[in-house]
Image: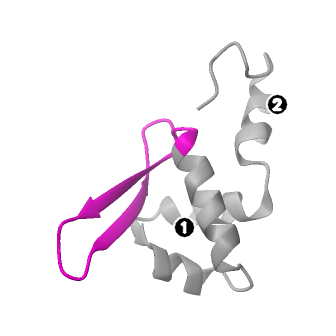
C-alpha cells in the first residue's frame, strides 16, 4: 500500500493511479453489488485472463481497496469485497 506521501496531491490523480486500469474499474463495478468469488468474477468479466484478474485483485488488496476473506471450508472458499476505502 502506498503511503500518503507517495500518492499524488490531486485526488483525481490519486484515484486514476489506484484504479485507472480497465479491468480494475470493471472489478470494482461488480464488487459494488456484493462480495464475489474469484471464478464468479472471471466469468462475469468476458475476456480477462486468470493472471490479469489475479494481479488486479492482489494490487487492489495491497492498496486497501478490497478485502479478501478466506473461509476454512473444504474446498476452500475465498470472497472479495470492497473495503471502506474502496
* Quarter of the figure with residue 30: bottom right
The CA distance from mark 1 to mark 2 is: 23 Å
Depth check: give the residue in front, 2 or 34. 2
Residue 56, above or below 39: above
Name the colour scheme: one colour
Q: Which residues are magenta?
A: 62-86
- The residue to which callout 1 is attached is 30
- Position of the N terminus by quadrant: top right
The reply to whether callout 1 and callout 2 are in contact (CB within 8 Å) is no
Q: Secondary structure at mark 2?
A: helix
Depth check: give the residue in front, 56 or 19. 56
Indicate left or right for 14 with 1 as reference. Answer: right
Give coordinates of residue 17: x percent, y percent.
78, 38
Residue at point 50%, 35% (across, down): 85
Give coordinates of residue 8: x percent, y percent.
79, 21
- The residue to which callout 2 is attached is 13
Residue at point 79%, 55% (across, down): 21
Q: How many neighbours does mark 2 have within 10 angstroms: few (below 14), some (14-19), or many (20 or more)?
A: few
Residue at point 53%, 76% (across, down): 41
Depth check: give the residue in front, 18 or 58. 58
Residue at point 59%, 66% (across, down): 54
Give coordinates of residue 67: x percent, y percent.
41, 50
Farthest-out residue, left: 73
Indicate left or right for 35 with 28 as reference. Answer: left
Amino acid at each position: 500500500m502506498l503511503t500518503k506521501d507517495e500518492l499524488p496531491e490531486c485526488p483525481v490523480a490519486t484515484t486514476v493511479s489506484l484504479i485507472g486500469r480497465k479491468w480494475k474499474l470493471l472489478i470494482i463495478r461488480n464488487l459494488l453489488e456484493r462480495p464475489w468469488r474469484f471464478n464468479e468474477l472471471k466469468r462475469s468479466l468476458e475476456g480477462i485472463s486468470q493472471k490479469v484478474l489475479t494481479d488486479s485483485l492482489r494490487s487492489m488488496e495491497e492498496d486497501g481497496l478490497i478485502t479478501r476473506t478466506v473461509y476454512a471450508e473444504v474446498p476452500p472458499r475465498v470472497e472479495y469485497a470492497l473495503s471502506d476505502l474502496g
